[in-house]
Image: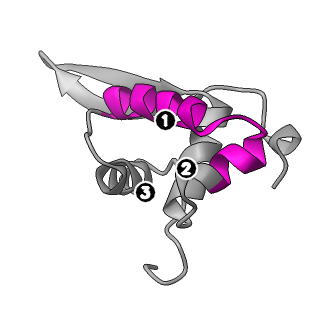
Amino acid sequence: MSILAVPDRLYRVKAFRYRGEEMVLQITPLERTVLQWLAEGKDHNEIASRLETIEKGVDADLSALFARLGVRTSADAISAGIKRGLVTAPAQLA
């Protein structure tokens, strides 16, 4: 999948409830694509290569995404992404 094939819109999903109010999580198409590649087992170096950037850039993108998702690890981010419908489970997990 080319980075040019990423839709130009924000993904909005229910994140959690806070004081009885539903909070909405917004992630960019690039963040969703990076999360999907992570779910497919790509490492940070492979993702950086696909995006034609450096690995530290991918690390920074993932750190921001992890904070938004309220997780600390890649496994937790993948799990949260699958539960919220942001990414699809890899074939071996489905």
Secondary structure of the residue carrying tag 1 is: helix
Front residue of 48 and 33: 48
Q: Which residue is mark 3?
A: 82
In the image, is 17 to the left or to the right of 48?
Answer: left
Q: Classify mark 3: residues with Cα within 10 Å, few (<14), some (14-19) or many (20+).
A: some
Residue at 29% over, 47% down: 73
Q: Confirm or deny contact between disc 3 and disc 1 (CB under 8 A).
A: no
As drawn, 40 above or below 93: above
- Mark drawn on residue 70: none
In the image, is 64 to the left or to the right of 30?
Answer: left
Residue at 39% over, 23% down: 24
- Mark drawn on residue 59: 1
Q: Confirm or deny contact between disc 1 and disc 2 (CB under 8 A).
A: yes
Image coords of residue 36 (percent x, y): 57, 54
Res. 12 in view = no
Q: Which residue is mark 2?
A: 44
Label 2 or label 3, whichever comes before in sequence order: 2
Secondary structure of the residue carrying tag 3 is: helix
Type of residue at label 3? Answer: Ile
The total of numbered circles placed on residues is 3
Q: Which-is-in-front pick, marks 3 and 1? A: 1
Q: Classify mark 1: residues with Cα within 10 Å, few (<14), some (14-19) or many (20+).
A: some
Front residue of 11 and 3: 3
Q: Mark 3 to mark 1: distance in Å?
A: 20 Å
* Image quarter of the N terminus: bottom right
Q: Mark 1 to mark 2: distance in Å?
A: 7 Å
Type of residue at label 2? Answer: His
Q: Which residue is situated farthest in the bottom direction here?
A: 92
Q: Which residues are magenta?
A: 46-69
Type of residue at label 1? Answer: Asp
Q: Classify mark 2: residues with Cα within 10 Å, few (<14), some (14-19) or many (20+).
A: some
Specify whether residue 58 is painted magenta. Answer: yes
